[in-house]
Amino acid sequence: MFDEMTGSVDAGGAVRPPYAELSRWLETVKPDLLNLRRREAEVLFRRIGITFAVYGDPEAQERLIPFDIIPRILAADEWQLLHRGLEQRVKAINAYVKDIYGRRDIIKAGVIPEDLIFQNPQFRPEMNGQTVPHDIYVHIAGIDIVRVDPKTFYVLEDNVRTPSGVSYMLENREIMLRLFPELFSRYRIAPVENYPEELLDTLKSVAPQTVPGEPTAVLLTPGVANSAYYEHSFLADKLGIELVEGRDLMVRDDVVYMRTTEGPKRVDVIYRRIDDDFLDPLVFRSDSALGVPGLMSAHQAGNLTLANAIGTGIADDKAVYSYMPEIIKFYLGASPILDNVPTWRCREPEHLKYVIERIEEMVIKEVHGSGGYGMLIGPKADKATIAAFRSKLKSVPHNFIAQPTLALSTCPTCTGDGLAPRHVDLRPFVLSGRDGVRIIPGGLTRVALQHGSLIVNSSQGGGTKDTWVLDA
């Protein structure tokens, strides 16, 4: 098993160069001080109010996401590889979404089965033949990355509807700067605090060409009951834009306006954190009180940019994910810089047979699942759970994909018993605007705090770390 600090958890290898200064610093720090700093971080997060809601859990409607004070460190050349791979992937995703709602060349070429698209609940026929400003559909993407050895990174998942977590990336850095200035002084670390500026520039760059003057952007939230409301309010504040709910907006003559004390103000770009179904009750769910009647007509008239565009969910489906290498080759004429995790599509009989025969060794995921739910981790599951999943695979195979149980990399983590290795992943945030792709160095490192656990999702007990990318 690969440890990002020592190279090997089992053998206790030599400290890798990116972690050399951290290792020397840890040798000088007493455990009591680390525990004190860990408690101080929790107090700071609680004081700031960084919480998330857990739906269906009456015992804990709001929780703090645990924060680990030991940073995860990436060398400059490691980040350069990730940067190139992420930029390539998001360009291909944008080309794919445009094609699906346009010419559908990839379906005509037989690269992707048409039923995988047209029977996908995230496919929006209302977008057929529709264009979006500057041909950009995915303005903000969160691409989940895992690592298995010194040179191998895999893309685990593409999040391109309403990716979340960037507020934790920013707050993690601020807390670390406050608690460990002496450790920062030992490194040259690429900044992340310019993300809000980069995001605002991206949003303004994709405003419709019909905008008279400086474009106005707002952030549309479902409201305080949403699990990510803290992030919505945090980002609106950092961006210097209005945080609005559906009732704050109206559409007149195919133009969106925001209600203000000084009268209606035109809105050109909506950074929406509301799912497609709830955006416009005249087009999607008629019972939605979260959206804005007429929003789709403003979009169709070319007077509004929605970030991300309606219908982008056809690109973060886990079955479509399995075709990403082919998607990249089809649109960009190149091999993927960052590979997928090897994936079996249970909808295909040969793949299904292979998976069922080896189910105890596999990770089984629901095609439309998220947050670590609806999964089977074969080596960790009991016989009854395995039997239940075997039955599901046989009855609705198209609902599942399967992957090998990877030995995810570990990073040193501050636990109640001292430092210990814990599995991690990484969610970098990729911004696509009219003037190109921007990627803030680093991203959100999520950590599985339980010994041996591979599930890093905050909804299931995972925590976060600050991610340091070293300047060359």
Image (tube, rainbow, N blue to C red):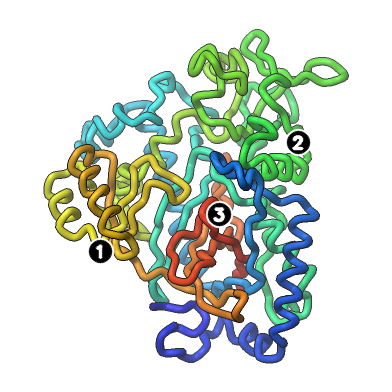
Q: Is residue 249 visible?
A: yes
Per the image, label 1 sits on a secondary structure element best described as helix
- Residue at position x 69%, y 26% in the image: 245
Residue 78 place in picture, x, y as percent: 49, 71
Vertical order, 5 against 406 (above or below): below
Q: Quadrant of the C terminus?
A: bottom right
Location of residue 373 in the rendering, given as x and y in whole percent from the top left corner: 42, 48
Residue 336 vs residue 161, the one in the foreground: 161
Left/right placement of residue 304 relative to residue 265 reads left
Which secondary structure lies at badge 2?
A: loop
Label 2 belongs to which residue? 241
Per the model, the C-alpha gap separating discs 2 and 1 is 48 Å
Asked which secondary structure carries label 3, the reply is: helix
Q: Which kind of residue does numbered mark 1 sit on? A: Glu
Amino acid type, label 2: Ile
For marks 3 and 2, give the one nearer the viewer.
Answer: 3
Query: Would you name the residue on which mark 1 appears?
Result: 361
The tag on residue 458 is 3
Indicate which label's residue lies in the foreground, 2 or 1: 1
Work out which quarter of the rendered image holds the N terminus and state it: bottom left
Q: Quadrant of residue 200?
A: top right
**Distance of label 3 from label 1 (alpha carbons):** 25 Å
Q: Residue at x 54, y 15 (%)?
A: 287
Dots 2 and 1: beta carbons under 8 Å? Answer: no
* Mark 2 / mark 1, whichever is N-terminal: 2
List the single residue furthest toward the right.
262
Mark 1 or mark 3, which is nearer the start of the sequence? Answer: 1
